[in-house]
């Protein structure tokens, strides 16, 4: 990825990156199809690991097996991802002093359709752990049959933060 213009805002600490992934509740997927580029917001689950100081991220989301999102993912597995949190207005004494505080992650990855009940259940468990911690959910075979679940291997991502004053 290109170097961040304001390097002082870049987050490289894997623990802080993990905090952002945990705190956010929506990831926006940048997809492309025959009609062009589009963005889809989805809830997600994740697996976040660190090896030799490098953060690794897998995202899971679910949806219908048909429609524009599903069709785009079937024809093109490359995706862009973006998530953000800690939003706030930064005020000032003049217009250009106003800004916005946030934490964000942006990156790119490869999406894979999960096919087996075991893979789907794992992905759905990750979603539930993130979106509804402690919820007891039964994944019935008929539900797993008709639910599409994807995993995104986010192979490159950066974090950024603009702190409130």
Image: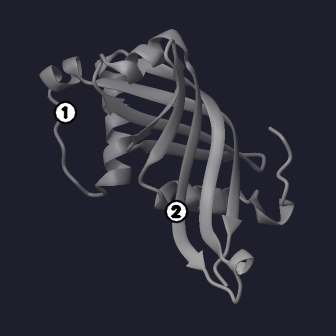
Task: Kindly identify the residue that appears in the image at 57 percent across and 39 percent down.
Answer: 81
Number of numbered discs present? 2
Q: Nearest the camera: 70 or 18?
A: 70
Q: Earlier in the sequence, mark 2 or mark 1?
A: 2
* Relative image position of residue 160 (x, y in whole percent): 70, 59
Q: Nearest the camera: 28 or 24?
A: 28
**In the depicted structure, whether residue 109 falls above or below residue 17:** above
**In the depicted structure, whether residue 80 falls above or below residue 102:** above
Task: Kindly identify the residue that appears in the image at 55 percent across and 14 percent down.
Answer: 76
**Which residue lies under the disc numbered 2?**
85
State the colouring used for the structure image: one colour
Residue placed furthest toward the front: 95
Mark 1, residues whose alpha carbon is within 10 Å: few (<14), some, or many (≥20)?
A: few
- Location of the C terminus (image quadrant): bottom right
* Relative image position of residue 6 (x, y in whole percent): 83, 60
Q: Quick check: 145 left or right of 39?
A: left
Task: Kindly identify the residue that appears in the image at 54 percent across and 57 percent down.
Answer: 84
Badge number at residue 139: 1
**In the depicted structure, whether residue 6 falls above or below residue 144:** below
Q: Quick check: 77 left or right of 127?
A: right
């Amino acid at each position: 990825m290109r170097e961040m213009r304001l390097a002082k805002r870049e987050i490289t600490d894997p623990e802080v990156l993990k905090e952002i992934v945990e705190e956010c509740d929506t990831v926006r997927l940048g997809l492309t199809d025959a009609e062009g580029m589009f963005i889809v917001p989805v809830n997600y689950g994740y697996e976040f690991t660190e090896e030799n100081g490098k953060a690794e991220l897998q995202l899971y989301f679910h949806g219908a097996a048909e429609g524009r999102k599903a069709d785009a993912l079937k024809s093109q597995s490359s995706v862009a991802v973006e998530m953000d949190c800690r939003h706030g207005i930064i005020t000032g004494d003049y217009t250009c002093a106003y800004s916005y505080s946030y934490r964000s992650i942006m990156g790119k990855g490869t999406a894979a359709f999960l096919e087996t009940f075991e893979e789907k259940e794992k992905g759905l468990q990750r979603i539930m752990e993130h979106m509804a911690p402690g919820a007891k959910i039964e994944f019935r075979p008929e539900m797993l049959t008709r639910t599409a679940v994807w995993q995104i291997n986010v192979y490159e991502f950066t974090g950024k933060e603009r702190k409130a004053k």
